[in-house]
């Protein structure tokens, strides 16, 4: 009578093991990645502080501005275990409408975001690595000379990369806060004195978003 019970016991153990393994599988991790902390879409408005590169041996020009991002979670479009399973892509637009002696900037393009963790630390801190690419425009309408700042008069536009890091803080009811710091690297930026050069400007953004 004992022999029939042995297969049943083994079957039960196998069933429990299968449930445990499925709970630890990549598909479950993927669901957590998309889950309550990172939704499919996020619409964000942000404040921007730009420390504009004004040329060699020159003080940076501090500019205040605003902008926004539309984030799209890539996890639903890729296979589990791939880098896209931890990623999002964003379309962004930022502008500093006025600043030191009528210098205006406009920056737009797309960001790739990599989340090292599936679930935020303590369900609160969600670190992120970013890499953006787009166009960076400067309009200089000043009539005087600001020291020897190497900023071309009129309007100039250049290709820009923005590697950076950030922290995202999820809030109940589909809200989130986010702070980012990035190095805005503008290639072939035209100056008033040096011709074309590569400039590096510190870009800090802080915003609030709504997730869907």
Image (tube, rainbow, N blue to C red):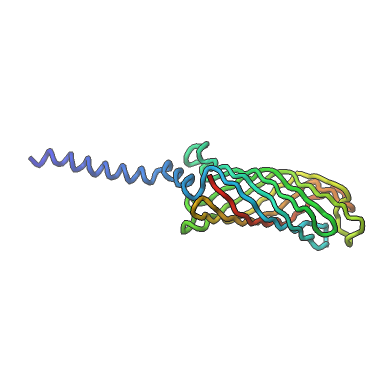
Question: Percent position (x, y) of residue 190?
Answer: 84, 48
Q: Residue furthest right?
A: 144
Q: Residue at x 19, y 43 (%)?
A: 9
Question: Percent position (x, y) of residue 204?
Answer: 68, 57
Q: Residue furthest front?
A: 173
Q: Residue at x 45, y 47 (%)?
A: 32
Question: Percent position (x, y) of residue 124?
Answer: 50, 58
**In the depicted view, which residue is nearer to us: 43 or 109?**
43
Q: Quadrant of residue 59?
A: bottom right
**In the depicted view, which residue is nearer to us: 64 or 201?**
64
Q: Residue at x 65, y 53 (%)?
A: 46
Above/below status of 185 relative to 12: below
State which quarter of the image contains the N terminus: top left
Q: Residue at x 67, y 54 (%)?
A: 182
Q: Residue furthest left?
A: 1
Q: Quadrant of residue 74?
A: top right
Question: Percent position (x, y) of residue 66?
Answer: 70, 53
**In the depicted view, which residue is nearer to us: 46 or 58?**
46
**In the depicted view, which residue is nearer to us: 161 or 66?**
66
Question: Seen in the image, is 105 located left or right of residue 9?
Answer: right
Q: Quadrant of residue 200?
A: bottom right
Label tally: 0
């Amino acid at each position: 009578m004992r022999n029939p019970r042995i297969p049943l016991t083994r079957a039960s153990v196998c069933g429990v093991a299968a449930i445990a393994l499925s709970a630890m599988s990549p598909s479950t991790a993927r669901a957590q990645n998309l889950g309550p902390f990172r939704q499919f879409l996020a619409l964000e408005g942000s404040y921007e502080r730009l420390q504009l590169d004004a040329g060699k041996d020159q003080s940076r020009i501090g500019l205040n501005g605003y902008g926004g991002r539309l984030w799209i979670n890539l996890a639903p479009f890729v296979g589990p275990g791939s880098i896209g399973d931890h990623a999002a892509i964003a379309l962004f637009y930022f502008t500093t409408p006025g600043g030191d002696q009528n210098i205006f900037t406009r920056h737009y393009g797309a960001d790739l975001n990599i989340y090292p963790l599936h679930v935020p630390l303590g369900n609160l801190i969600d670190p992120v690595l970013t890499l953006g690419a787009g166009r960076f425009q400067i309009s200089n309408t000043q009539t005087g000379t600001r020291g020897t700042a190497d900023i071309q008069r009129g309007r100039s536009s250049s290709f820009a990369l923005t590697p950076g890091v950030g922290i995202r803080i999820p809030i109940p009811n589909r809200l989130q806060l986010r702070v980012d710091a990035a190095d805005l690297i503008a290639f072939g930026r035209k100056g008033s004195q040096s011709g074309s050069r590569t400039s590096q400007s510190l870009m800090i953004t802080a915003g609030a978003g709504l997730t869907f």
